[in-house]
Amino acid sequence: MTFSLVDVGANLAHDSFDDDRDAMMQRAEDAGVTTMIVTGSSDDSNVRAAELAEAHPGVLYSTAGVHPHHASDYTDESDTLIRSLVDKDVVVAVGECGLDYFRNFSPRDAQLDAFRRQLQIAKDTGMPVFLHQRDAHDDFVEVLDEFLPDLSRAVAHCFTGEGESLREYLAMGLYIGITGWICDERRGKHLHDIVDVIPDDRLLIETDAPYLMPRTIQPKPKTRRNEPMHLTEVLKVVAEARGQTEEHVARVTTENARRFFALPPAG
């Protein structure tokens, strides 16, 4: 059965797709992944993501932001660039932005500053926010709380946390993005056990391609590069974990994605 799915987070500007991007998009379409949000995470990728979206109207949209890994590179020019890009019809969210204390590729002060500046852009423009958080829950909540009353919508992208943080994010009004992490029997079992806590109207699904290839795919793919066509595997595992049909999860996640990103109706 073919669905009409929205992959709300795919790093399609990544250079691993440079040799077969059109074929990859065709495989996605054949699998029923008809709309993809291309994640922007740095000055260069923000521009590239918007260019890709403009080249594929109605199929690709993009976000504009600076990932916490690149927070040290956040400048006034970065801020101006994001503000200019979100004026484009194809750019549908601010982000990926947030905090990542797991790797600390940028100093924490730089991460906090870049995060606040991007939340300010979302506040000023009314755009939804595409959020990243890893091992930084307390600071993340503290900063987000300050801006939340003035934000239109926000999603915890690639949620991998525990039940307590999930319930806190839901209480804050966040949407929750679930990736192939839920398909990982080593790291994702806890997520499999709590995903049914998410209300139907707050659930989103994503691949985070080219990362997080679902480990449940059979036969095992020859490559470790994930791509949007594998969103169907995330859908299958999420539906099973929630005790719902794939048709139901496909319908609600697509409706949620179109509402969250203010996308036009399909077709």
Image (spheres, rainbow, N blue to C red):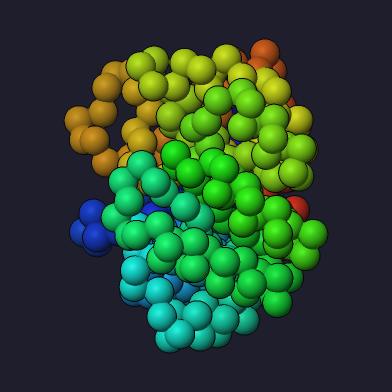
The residue shown at (43%, 29%) is 181
Where is 82 relative to 137, above or below? below
Which sits in the foreground, 117 or 245? 117
Residue 9 is left or right of residue 225, and the answer is: right
Q: Nearer the viewer, residue 198 or 1?
A: 198
Residue at 69% across, 30% down: 167
Whether residue 88 can be seen here:
no
Does residue 80 appear in this view? yes
Please tell me in which quadrant of the rendered image residue 120 appears: bottom right
Q: On the rendered image, what quadrant is the C terminus found in?
A: bottom right
- Drawn side of residue 224 relative to residue 262, left or right: left
Residue at the (36%, 36%) spot, across then down: 212
Q: Looking at the image, is 84 positioned above or below residue 197?
A: below
Residue at 67% across / 20% down in the picture?
A: 196
Estimate the x, y position of residue 155 in percent, counting from the top left: 63, 48
Q: Considering only vertical position in the picture, is 141 above or below 163?
A: below
Residue 118, position in %: x, y? 56, 69
**Residue 44 versus residue 259: which sits nearer the camera?**
44
Residue 42 left/right relative to 120: left
Does residue 243 appear to the left or right of 21 in the view shown?
Answer: right
Exactly how many numbered labels are in the figure? 0
Residue 111 percent location from the top left of the image: 43, 61
- x and y percent of residue 172 in the render? 74, 44
Q: Quadrant of the N terminus?
A: top right
